[in-house]
Amino acid sequence: MVISMGRIRILAVDDSAINLAAIEQALKEEYEVIAVNSGSRALQYLKSETPDLILLDIQMTSMDGLETLKEIRAMRGGRSIPVIMLTAKNDKTTFLESTKLGIYDYIVKPFQSEYLHERILRALKRAGVITFTSIELKAELKKLQRDIESDNRKGALLRADEMVNYKVDAMVRQTILKVRERIVAGDANGALSCLNGIL
């Protein structure tokens, strides 16, 4: 694990004390966890603090997760905070609504601790909070290469857009932007040629 992760703050929002305790127990070794039991308390916290990531339960009484997320996104600086939605039911409509509000991930409960760690780590990397290792970055670039080779233009564009926000050196970011330009232009060979320069 990355040593600096002890300073990373995660705001966990769930109206179930049992769920909050489980999240705190799973994450306390590596993250600073701020646990609140309602959407309104989360919004109050966010008026003065900015966590590195928010774990937000969807099904809460009084103010549900989607309402809370809409309020977070409307707050100053709230658009840039990575949010992972937590839910007990796999509901496609809710997932789509959450996605429109810019969530980073969607996890169905119950979940294993290792799985939660994996998804949090991925969201923090996507948000540029922590850096990908060179091996992880190469794996991500290979996925982009596969999307281009399989003519999955939409998937390649989404992946390139995501990768531009990664915490990477300027040369890699510039190359990813060039790859994206070539994908938009429909030049798969040009995109692959650019990509091969950093693979």
Image (tube, rainbow, N blue to C red):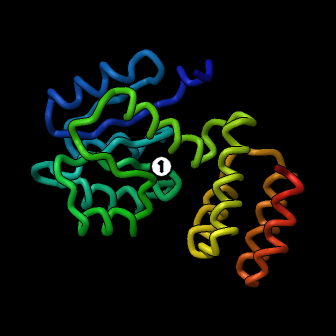
Depth order, front residue of 30/181? 181
Left/right placement of residue 110 relative to residue 197 reads: left
User: Left or right of 150: which side holds 81?
Assistant: left
Residue 87, compared with residue 129, is above or below; it is: below
Which residue appears farthest toward the left when viewing the image? 61
Q: Is residue 55 left or right of residue 78?
A: left
Q: Is residue 133 above or below residue 197?
A: above
Q: In this view, which residue lies farthest toward the front?
A: 150
Q: Is residue 132 above or below residue 191?
A: above
Residue found 82% across the figure and 74% down from its top = 189
Closer-to-camera residue (97/11) = 97
Q: Which residue is mark 1?
A: 82
> How many residues crowd around disc 1 within 10 Å: few (fewer than 14), some, or many (20 or more)?
many
> In x, y percent, where is residue 49?
45, 39
Q: Which residue corresponds to the image point at 30% horizontal and 43% vertical from the top-left?
A: 42
What percent of the width, then of the height, locates residue 177?
A: 78, 65
Q: Is residue 13 visible?
A: yes
- Residue 160, image quadrant: bottom right
Q: Quadrant of the N terminus?
A: top right
Give the x, y percent position of residue 175. 83, 60
Report the front residue among 119 and 61.
Answer: 119
* Vertical comparison of 26 with 150: above or below: above
| Residue located farthest toward the bottom when viewing the structure as drawn | 185
Q: Is residue 43 visible to us here? A: no
